Amino acid sequence: MKQVATTDIKDALAAFGKCVCDGARLMIGVPDYETYATHMRRMHPERPVMSYAEFFRERQSARYGAGSTRGFRCC
């Protein structure tokens, strides 16, 4: 029987916990700024990365329909 190092188990549980938390945040509409910033720097280095405040405002506008003629939209 192969023995697994305790740090491997801790690392795996930490990664799993982060995935669960990230999923829960996305379900309630709280996107992850760090994921966005990493993606933008890696995949679109020529484009500027929004500040956290800009990112938050943009995500809220996208979710709740700010500036649209539909009015308030929750879901």
Image: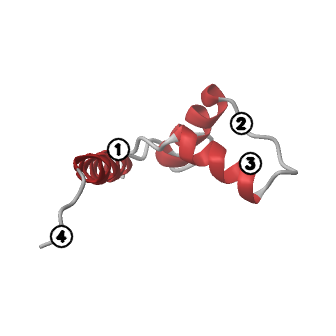
Q: Which sits earlier in the primary sequence, circle 3 or circle 1?
A: 1
The residue tagged 1 is 25
Q: Where is residue 48 in the image (x, y as percent from the top left)?
A: 81, 41
Q: Which sits earlier in the primary sequence, circle 4 or circle 2?
A: 4
Tag nearer the camera, 2 or 3: 3
Dots 3 and 1: beta carbons under 8 Å? no
The residue tagged 3 is 41
Give the structural element (helix, strand or loop) at label 3.
helix
Q: Residue at (71%, 50%) from the top-left corner?
A: 40
Q: How far apart are marks 1 and 2 (CA)?
A: 20 Å
Badge number at residue 50: 2
Q: Can residue 15 be seen in this view?
A: yes
Count residues near mark 1 (Cα–Cα under 10 Å), then give few for <14, some for 14-19, many for 20+: few
Q: Position of residue 10 (x, y in %)?
A: 25, 46
Between residue 7 and residue 26, name the one nearer to us.
Answer: 7
Residue 4 placement: quadrant: bottom left
Q: Position of residue 1 (x, y in %)?
A: 11, 73
Tag nearer the camera, 3 or 1: 3
Question: In the displayed structure, does residue 42 sit left or right of residue 58?
Answer: right
Between residue 9 and residue 60, name the one nearer to us.
Answer: 9
Dots 1 and 2: beta carbons under 8 Å? no
Q: How far apart are marks 4 and 2 (CA)?
A: 47 Å
Q: Examine the rendered structure and indicate whether residue 2 appears above or below residue 43.
A: below
The residue tagged 4 is 2
Identity of the residue furthest to the top in this view: 53
Q: Which sits earlier in the primary sequence, circle 1 or circle 4?
A: 4
Question: In the displayed structure, does residue 13 sit left or right of residue 33?
Answer: left
Tag nearer the camera, 4 or 3: 4
Dots 2 and 3: beta carbons under 8 Å? no
Give the structural element (helix, strand or loop) at label 1.
helix
Q: Position of residue 70 (x, y in %)?
A: 51, 50
